[in-house]
Image (spheres, rainbow, N blue to C red):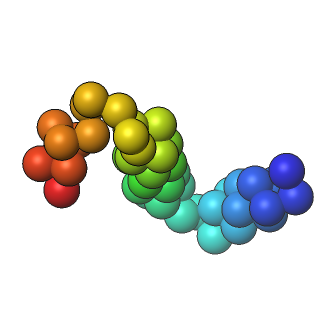
Amino acid sequence: MGFLSELWEFMRVRKKFWLLPIIVMMAVFGGLVVMSQGSAVAPFIYTIF
């Protein structure tokens, strides 16, 4: 949680709120790839990338 609080503090102080959607989408895609490892959905996920 320390990393997230430091990241939020950085974005708040430096007015870099445009980074938030990028970070969220990277986390969503990363979670999707991790969750689809070894499943039947994996070939369809990899065609996106």
* Residue closer to the observer: 34 or 8: 34
Q: How many marks?
A: 0
The answer, for residue 24, to whether it is visible in the render is: no
- Looking at the rendered image, the quarter that the C terminus falls into is bottom left
Tell me: residue 43, above or below residue 5.
above
Residue plotted at (79% across, 61% down):
3
* Left or right: where 23 falls relative to 15: left
Q: Quadrant of residue 7?
A: bottom right
Residue plotted at (20% across, 50% down):
46
Q: Position of residue 28 (x, y in %)?
A: 44, 41
Q: Quadrant of residue 39?
A: top left
Q: Position of residue 44 (x, y in %)?
A: 16, 37
Outermost left residue: 47
Q: Position of residue 26 (x, y in %)?
A: 43, 53
Residue plotted at (27% across, 29% down):
40
The answer, for residue 41, to whether it is visible in the render is: yes
Outermost right residue: 2
Outermost top residue: 40
Tell me: residue 8, above or below residue 25.
below
* Residue closer to the observer: 7 or 17: 7
* Residue closer to the observer: 7 or 14: 7
* Left or right: where 39 falls relative to 31: left
* Left or right: where 3 falls relative to 28: right
Residue plotted at (26% across, 31% down):
41
